[in-house]
Image (cartoon, grey):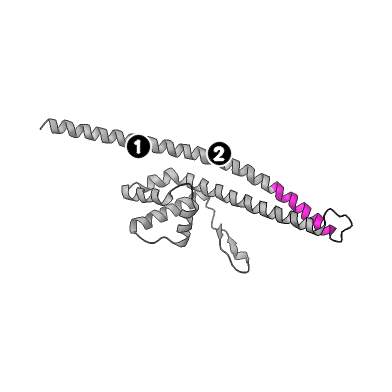
Amino acid sequence: MRRALNMPATAADCTQDGTKGALALTRERMTSIAGKIRTRAALTAEERQFVANVRTLPVYRMLEWGVRQDVVDSVISDTDELVALTLAYQMLNDLTRSIDFAISNAERGTSAAGAADGASANICQTRILTKGIEQLRDLREEVLRQRAQMRQSYIAALSQANLSTGYAGLIRQRDRDARDAAGTAASRNR
């Protein structure tokens, strides 16, 4: 989905952006940012926002390092899932806060309208609000369940990324040690 904000709201605010999932969109955005780092071009506002939204990972620095080391494709393939999960988790957090805000406002509205007073002239309105509050609470529970699952997926992806990083570091160190040993042996033979 592509999101734009028109004032007042229109049907064009939320349009289908193909059938790409969050992972493919994340990969595309990271590839675009890496290309701009390579060419020293300025990031677009959307790209800057993307980097800012991934608060738990230094996306820009990781991509910058990948460009410098000429391993940007490897960096993207190792971290794209983690970045997508981070963004999805943050979106679920934002949704939870929005639902909580809507529930508290609706509860205040029912109290102000006299939901407890059966003789109130606004009783029909308060019953509608009460039903809406129940539905919002159910939605909140579903979002919390999804968020818990997302957190588990995030932690698993983070563990995998840490394992990959540790293994890559070990391979680089062993490669460096082998080159140093070969260089030392070559200099002794001279």
- Name the quadrant of the N terminus: bottom right
When asked about the image quadrant of residue 174, the answer is top left
* Extent of the magenta region: 122-138
Q: Is residue 126 magenta?
A: yes
When asked about the image quadrant of residue 163, the answer is top left
Q: Earlier in the sequence, mark 2 or mark 1?
A: 2
Amino acid at circle 1: Gly
Residue where numbered disc 2 is placed: 152
- As drawn, the residue found furthest toward the right would be 119
- Name the quadrant of the C terminus: top left
Q: CA distance from mark 2 to mark 1?
A: 26 Å
- As drawn, the residue found furthest toward the bottom would be 7
Residue 95, given in percent of the width and then of the height, sits at 62, 52
Left or right position of 138 against 175: right
Question: Which residue is at a point 48% across and 44% down the rendered structure image?
Answer: 82
| 155 over 12 or under it: above or below | above
Residue 92, given in percent of the width and then of the height, sits at 59, 49
Residue where numbered disc 1 is placed: 169
Q: Nearer the viewer, residue 184 or 104?
A: 104
Magenta span: helix, strand or loop, mainly? Answer: helix
Question: Which residue is at a point 63% across and 44% down the rendered structure image?
Answer: 144
| 115 over 169 or under it: above or below | below
| 173 over 114 or under it: above or below | above
Q: Is residue 68 magenta?
A: no
Residue 181, given in percent of the width and then of the height, sits at 21, 31
Amino acid at circle 2: Gln
The disc at residue 141 is: none
Q: Nearer the viewer, residue 125 or 79?
A: 125
Residue 46, given in percent of the width and then of the height, sits at 48, 60
Q: Nearer the viewer, residue 94 or 142?
A: 94
Question: Which residue is at a point 67% across and 47% down the rendered structure image?
Answer: 140
